[in-house]
């Protein structure tokens, strides 16, 4: 069973006042479990949930010119969703897939919208979560401009050392914007 206190701690990191509002968010949380390879969200469908990952790894990807492109990973302690779809309630262009068994919690769109209507404080926490997601995306885009693939790989390793053991090399290479053979060369050069 996932630990609900992990969600509380993550919300507190976003908004120190969310502890006062925890009683509003807690009833909305639904435990979820996904087996390796399962989809949390599908491209072409509307994303109806924000997931908090307590264990496992989720890959966010799209298909471009018949090739899967990994855009992001979500690790334990992080939120994940097809955010543009979730916000606009339009079909997603990305998919979310469990690349290891995943446990966590889901906040569903309709429940959150109802909560936001009732509580300005909860709406504030939701806005901070959206801002956090935006900053993560912005930092990733800047990393492509500022750092080499090797530097981005080293940063990924520093932040999430489990990637080497748990994520297939083709997904990591795609995430870094390089071919698997190039990532193999980088890895050999680090050994």
Image (cartoon, rainbow, N blue to C red):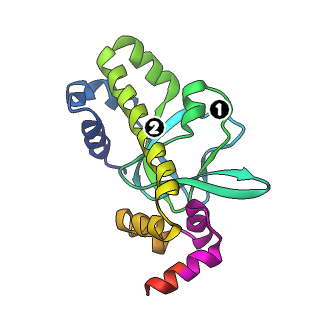
Q: Residue at x 62, y 69 (%)?
A: 170
The front one of 160 and 140 is 140
The front one of 38 and 142 is 142
Q: Residue at x 68, y 32 (%)?
A: 91
Asked if residue 174 shows in the view, the reply is yes
The residue to which callout 1 is attached is 46
Q: Which residues are magenta?
A: 167-185
Which residue is outermost to the front?
Answer: 146
Q: Residue at x 44, y 24 (%)?
A: 112
Label 1 crowd bin: few (<14), some (14–19), many (20+), radius 10 Å: some
Residue 73, magenta (yes or no): no
Does 129 sit above or below residue 142? above
Magenta span: predominant SS is helix
Does 39 sit above or below residue 106? below
Does 98 sit above or below residue 31? below
Which residue is outermost to the right?
Answer: 66
Asked if residue 36 shows in the view, the reply is no
The residue to which callout 2 is attached is 134
């Amino acid at each position: 069973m996932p630990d609900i206190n992990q969600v509380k701690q993550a919300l507190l990191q976003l908004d120190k006042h969310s502890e006062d509002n925890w009683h509003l968010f807690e009833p909305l949380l639904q435990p979820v479990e996904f087996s390796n390879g399962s989809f949390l969200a599908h491209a072409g469908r509307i994303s109806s949930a924000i997931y908090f990952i307590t264990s496992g790894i989720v890959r966010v990807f799209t298909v471009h010119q018949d090739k899967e492109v990994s855009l992001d990973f979500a690790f334990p302690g992080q939120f994940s969703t097809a955010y543009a779809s979730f916000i606009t309630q339009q079909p997603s262009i990305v998919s979310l897939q469990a690349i290891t068994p995943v446990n966590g919690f889901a906040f569903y769109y309709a429940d959150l919208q109802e909560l936001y209507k009732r509580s300005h404080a909860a709406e504030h926490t939701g806005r901070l979560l959206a801002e956090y997601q935006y900053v993560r995306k912005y930092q990733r885009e800047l990393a492509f401009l500022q750092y080499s693939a090797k530097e981005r790989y080293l940063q990924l390793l520093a932040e999430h050392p489990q990637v080497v053991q748990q994520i297939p090399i083709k997904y990591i290479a795609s995430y870094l914007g390089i071919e698997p053979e190039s990532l193999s060369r980088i890895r050999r050069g680090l050994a």
